[in-house]
Image (cartoon, helix red, strand yellow):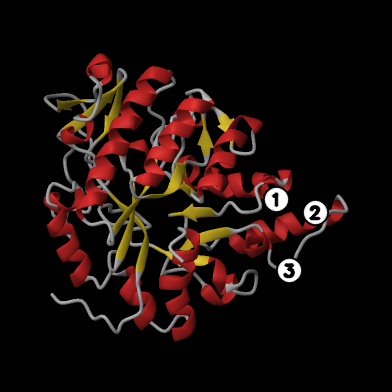
Amino acid sequence: MQRNTMRLTTIDADAHVIEQPYTWSFMEEADRAFLPMVVNYASGHERYGAQGNLQKEFWVVDGRLQAKEANLGLDNTTVESREMRDVSARIKHMDELEIDVQVLYPTLFLRPITQNPRAEYAIFHSYNRWLAEIWKKAPDRLRWVVIPPLYSPESVLRAELEWAKDNGACGVFMRGQECERRLSDPYFEPLYRIAEELNLMVGIHSGNGAFQTHDFFGDEAGFNKFKLPCVGALHDLLMKGTPANFPKLRWGFIEISAQWVPYLLNDLKIRFQRRGKRFTSDMLKDNNVYVACQVTDDFDHILKYTAGDTLVIGTDYGHHDTSAQIEALRMLRENGEVDAALADRILGENAARLYGFD
C-alpha cells in the first residue's frame, strides 16, 4: 500500500512490542543467569487470556512467574508483527491502518520484575538493545521508550539513557509506582534531570512497578493495580510541584484514558486553594503534561477542564484489553466526537510535541 503523502502525519502514541526469546539475545555472557525463561503449562489450574485463549507459555524472570499470553491481540495482529519477528510486516500493517509513526512500549514490564539491581540492569539492557535494533530497520516509522535501570547508580542510568537517545529512543518508560516508591520521591530526581537534559519525555504507562501494591491486588481486573496508580501519580506529582522543578520535561500518561482528568483537576483545585497555592486555568498544559485519550471518552466533558493541546491517542497495538482499539486513530478522525482540527492535533501535532518530534 502506497502511503498518502498529502495526509497529515498520524502518530500512534501507544503501541506495543511483545517480548520473545530473541529479546534477551543481547545479554552479556556474565549475566546469562538472569536470562528470562519460557515455561510451558502442563497441568494444574488453567489460566485464560483476554481473548479466552488458554495460556500455554509463561515467563520466569528472576524466579518469578510472569504472564506471557494474557493480553495478546490475537484477532487483529500477527505474531510476526507484534513480536517484531518481521519488521516489514509491522510496517505494512501500519500502512494499512494509515499510521505514520508508532511509539513502542513494552509488555512484560508493565508489572514489577525484580529488585535485584544486577538482574534488572541485565534484562533492561538487553531489551533496550532489541528495541534499538528494531528502530534501525525503520527509523522514520518506529520510535521507542527506554526502560531505565532504576536500581543502578546514576552514572549507569545516565549512560543507558544517553545510549538510548542516540539509538532512536524518544522517551523514558515508567509505571505509576516504581521501586516501592511514589514517583514524587526525590529518589527519581536524577532520572528526571537526565531525561530533561536529553529531551526525553517521561512516559508513565498503565502499570505498576511496586511489588507490594501489585501483589496486594492479586487477580483484580487491573483497574486498581495498573491504572489508578498512574492517576494517583499525577495527582501527587502536581501536589509536590515536581513538574515545576523540571520545567522543560514533558510527561505523558499513557493507556489510562482521559476520563479521569476532570475528577483529578477538580480535586486538585480544592486542595490548592485551601493551601493558598496558585491553581492555573490549564494545569496540564502549564506543567507539560499530556494524556492519552480513548475514542470512548466523553470529550465534551474533558475539554471543559483542559485544552485539546494536551491530548494524544494510541492503538495499544498488540494487546487486547480495555484500552486496545487498533482502529482508534482512524476512528477519531471519522466518528465526529471531536472536530476535525482537534482530531488532527491529537493525532499529529500534540504527539509530535510530547515525543520531541517537532
Q: CA distance from mark 2 to mark 1?
A: 15 Å
The disc at residue 272 is 2
Residue that label 1 marks? 244
Task: Give the mark count.
Answer: 3
Residue closer to the observer: 27 or 237: 27
Q: Position of residue 55 (x, y in %)?
A: 18, 37
| Quadrant of the image containing the N terminus | bottom left
User: What amino acid type is highlighted by mark number 2?
Assistant: Phe
Instruction: Kindly check if marks 3 and 2 are in contact, taking CB atoms under 8 A apart as contact.
Output: no
Mark 1: amino acid: Ala
Upstream in sequence: badge 2 or badge 1: 1
- Give the residue drawn at x 56%, y 77%: 300
Q: Earlier in the sequence, mark 1 or mark 3?
A: 1
In the rendered view, does 338 fall on the left or right side of 14? right
Q: Give the CA separation, mark 1 to mark 3.
A: 16 Å
- Residue depth check, mark 3 versus mark 2: number of the one nearer the observer: 3
Q: Image point 25% across, 21% down: which residue?
A: 28
Which residue occupies the foreground of this view, 166 or 63?
A: 166
Earlier-in-chain disc, 3 versus 2: 2
Q: Amino acid at mark 3?
A: Ser
Say few, some or many: other residues with alpha carbon within 10 Å of mark 1 (under 14 / 14 to 19 / 20 or more): some
